[in-house]
Image (cartoon, helix red, strand yellow):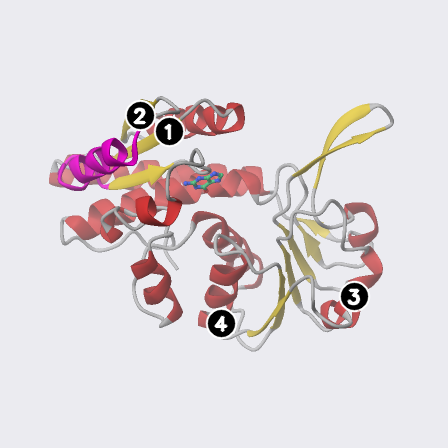
Amino acid sequence: MVAQVIDGKAFAAKVRAQVADQVAKLKEENGITPGLAVVLVGEDPASQVYVRSKGKMTVEVGMNSYEHKLDAETSEEDLLALIDKLNNDPAVHGILVQLPLPKHLNEDLVINSIDPAKDVDGFHISNVGLLGTGQKSMVPCTPLGCLMMLRDHHGSLSGMDAVVIGRSNIVGKPMAQLLLGDSCTVTIAHSRTKDLPDVVRRADIVVAAVGRPEMVPGDWIKEGATVIDVGINRIERDGKNKLVGDVDYASAAERAGAITPVPGGVGPMTIACLLANTLTAACRANGLPEPEGLTA
Ligand code: GUN
């Protein structure tokens, strides 16, 4: 079988266009412009690239973007004071504190100081609990993007066997909760899982989110399975820098029914879902119906 390639770049563009349409409607009918505040502490080069890209796409869909760049030595007290100000600003519907934070700042404390209703990353402990109990929450962007692609490809996921490789709080665990919410039978596999190849071979859906370049070979993939590769790993091959996923794409594509490439698969969906979450937060804050097809 030669896999269908799931084009995340095109899908993300479609999601952003849907968000832009709904934002235009919200402005016209309700006089509301959703606003996203992004807080960056320090000068981590990768974080600067992400934040610039987020700001640009926020404006492109018609939302207001508020960027707060703080120097690397910013105290916890000053950062918490800024978050408190954003929590109380009615023009700000979403708040994202770019991670990782400098070592002297307590990440859990900072994230949990964000108003859960504005926590568009879905990292606040209240949102984690709401998702785990199947209640309305803000859902982490990368797993939400994976779920949207899976629903788009399969329609219903009910009864499918799903294996999530990786147990991070940002991807693995919320991904498993979302798949369970869509009535999959879910296994979370990790570095201590016994007989990982056989566990993966049982899966109709494989979500790989471990951060290890090409660790899942094609012969672990069941014929016709759907493979979602969350990994973005920089490697050097033949003297060139290359981006690869957690799945060995060439061999997996020979067995899978559908597969996301790296780059151009899950990656572009993360920012698209951040914008979707900001729109959702703006609708909820104003007691309006949630945007269709853009939530879990
Ligand atoms: N750093 C890398 N990815 C992310 C993300 O999705 N959210 C936040 N807050 N920081 C990140």
Camera-nearest label, 2 or 4 = 2
Kind of residue at badge 2: Glu
Cα separation, mark 3 vs mark 2, equals 46 Å
Vertical placement of residue 199 versus 248, above or below: below
Closer to the eye: label 1 or 3: 1
Q: Residues within 10 Å of mark 3 (few under 14, many from 20)?
A: many
The quadrant of the rendering that contains the C terminus is: bottom left
**Which of label 1 and label 2 is nearer to you?**
1
Which residue position holds label 4? Answer: 180
Q: Main secondary structure of the magenta part?
A: helix
Q: Residues within 10 Å of mark 1 (few under 14, many from 20)?
A: many
> Callout 4 environment at 10 Å: few (<14), some (14 to 19), or many (20+)?
many
> From the viewer's perspective, is residue 251 above or below residue 62?
below
Q: Earlier in the sequence, mark 3 or mark 2?
A: 2
Q: Residue 198, how many percent across, how many down?
A: 78, 72
Can residue 14 be spotted in the picture?
Answer: no
Span colored in magenta: 74-93
Residue 47: give x, y in percent of width and height: 48, 29
Q: Look at mark 2 in the image and give the residue it sits on.
A: 67
**Viewer-nearest of labels 3 and 2?**
2
What is the CA distance from the residue labelled 4 to the residue labelled 1? 33 Å
Three-letter code, disc 1: Leu
Which residue is more in the foreground, 128 or 153? 128
Tell me the residue that label 3 is attached to: 223
